[in-house]
Image (cartoon, rainbow, N blue to C red):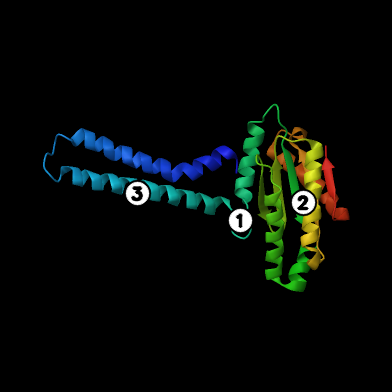
C-alpha cells in the first residue's frame, strides 16, 4: 500500500472517534443552556463517551472491510483488484522524476507441487513466495497476488541496476526455500516508460514473463 493510504487507514478509527467527540461537544454547546440541573453534566459525559466509542468502532469496521476487499486471504498480500487500481493510478499520475518498474512472477512447475505433495504443500509454497516478495518490497512499492501462482510487484524511485539486483535476490531466495519441492520462479520486468496505459504495460510484462518461462528459473527485462 502506498504511504498516504496506509496512514489514512491506520488513523481512521482515531479520526472517526475525534469526529464523534466533536459532534457531541457541538451538541452540548448548543444545548448547554437548555438544561440546568445536577444531572446535566453526567448525561452529556455519557453521550460524549458513547459518540467516541461508536466513532472508533466504525473506523475499525471500515478498516477491516477494506482489508478483506483488497487482500488475498491465503498470502495476505494485496489482491488483483488492488493491484490494477494502483497500477492505473500510477500511470495516470506519473512522477516525472521517478520510474516505476513492474514485475510479473510465476512459479515454475507449480502444478507438480500440488500433484506430488498435495494442495496444502502448494499453499505453503505460495505463502513462502509471498513472504519473500514482502521482504524485498521497496518502501514505495508493493507486492500482490494476481491469482494462482502468479504474482506482481511494483517498485518506484529506483534504477534498472537496483531492480535487476532485487529480482535476482528474490529468484535465488525463493529457489533456495522451494528446493524441497524442486521448484523455481520466472520473472518478467518492464519499465513504466515502455507504455502509457496499464493494459499495454501489463501486456509487455506478460510477454517478458512468457519469455522467462520458456527457459524457466530466469529473469527477462523488457526495455
Residue 193 found in image quarter: top right
| Residue at image coords 81%, 46% | 208
Left or right: residue 57 compared with residue 7: left
| Residue 170, numbered circle | 2
| Residue 27, numbered circle | none
Which is closer to the viewer, label 2 or label 1? 2
Labels 3 and 1: the sequence-earlier one: 3
Look at mark 1 in the image and give the residue it sits on: 76
Q: Residues within 10 Å of mark 3 (few under 14, many from 20)?
A: some
Asked which secondary structure carries label 1, the reply is loop
Name the residue furthest top: 96
Disc 3 and disc 1 in contact, CB within 8 angstroms: no
Quadrant holding the N terminus: top right
The location of residue 191, given as percent across then percent down, is 76, 37
**How far is disc 2 from disc 1 in space, using C-alphas?**
18 Å
Asked which secondary structure carries label 3, the reply is helix
Left or right: residue 178 compared with residue 68: right
| Residue at image coords 36%, 39% | 19
Visible residue check, residue 203: yes
Q: Residues within 10 Å of mark 2 (few under 14, many from 20)?
A: many
Circle count? 3
The location of residue 4, given as percent across then percent down, is 55, 37
The location of residue 142, given as percent across then percent down, is 66, 45
Labels 2 and 1: the sequence-earlier one: 1
Q: Nearer the viewer, residue 148 or 155?
A: 155
Q: Is residue 106 above or below residue 162?
A: below
Look at mark 3 in the image and give the residue it sits on: 54
Amino acid at each position: 500500500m502506498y504511504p498516504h493510504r496506509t496512514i489514512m487507514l491506520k488513523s481512521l478509527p482515531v479520526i472517526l472517534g475525534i469526529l464523534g467527540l466533536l459532534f457531541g461537544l457541538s451538541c452540548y454547546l448548543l444545548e448547554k443552556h437548555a438544561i440546568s440541573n445536577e444531572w446535566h453534566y453526567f448525561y452529556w459525559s455519557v453521550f460524549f463517551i458513547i459518540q467516541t466509542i461508536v466513532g472508533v468502532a466504525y473506523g475499525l469496521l471500515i478498516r477491516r472491510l477494506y482489508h478483506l476487499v483488497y487482500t488475498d486471504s491465503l498470502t495476505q498480500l494485496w489482491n488483483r483488484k488492488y493491484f490494477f487500481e494502483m497500477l492505473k493510478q500510477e500511470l495516470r499520475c506519473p512522477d516525472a522524476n521517478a520510474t516505476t518498474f513492474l514485475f510479473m512472477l510465476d512459479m515454475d512447475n507449480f502444478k507438480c507441487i500440488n500433484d506430488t505433495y498435495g494442495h496444502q504443500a502448494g499453499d505453503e509454497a505460495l505463502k513462502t513466495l509471498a513472504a519473500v516478495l514482502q521482504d524485498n518490497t521497496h518502501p514505495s512499492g508493493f507486492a500482490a497476488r494476481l491469482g494462482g501462482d502468479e504474482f506482481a510487484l511494483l517498485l518506484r524511485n529506483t534504477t534498472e541496476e537496483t531492480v535487476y539486483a532485487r529480482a535476482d535476490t528474490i529468484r535465488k531466495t525463493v529457489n533456495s526455500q522451494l528446493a524441497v519441492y524442486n521448484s523455481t520462479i520466472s520473472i518478467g520486468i518492464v519499465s513504466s516508460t515502455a507504455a502509457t496505459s496499464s493494459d499495454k504495460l501489463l501486456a509487455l510484462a506478460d510477454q517478458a514473463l512468457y519469455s522467462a518461462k520458456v527457459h524457466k528459473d530466469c529473469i527477462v527485462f523488457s526495455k
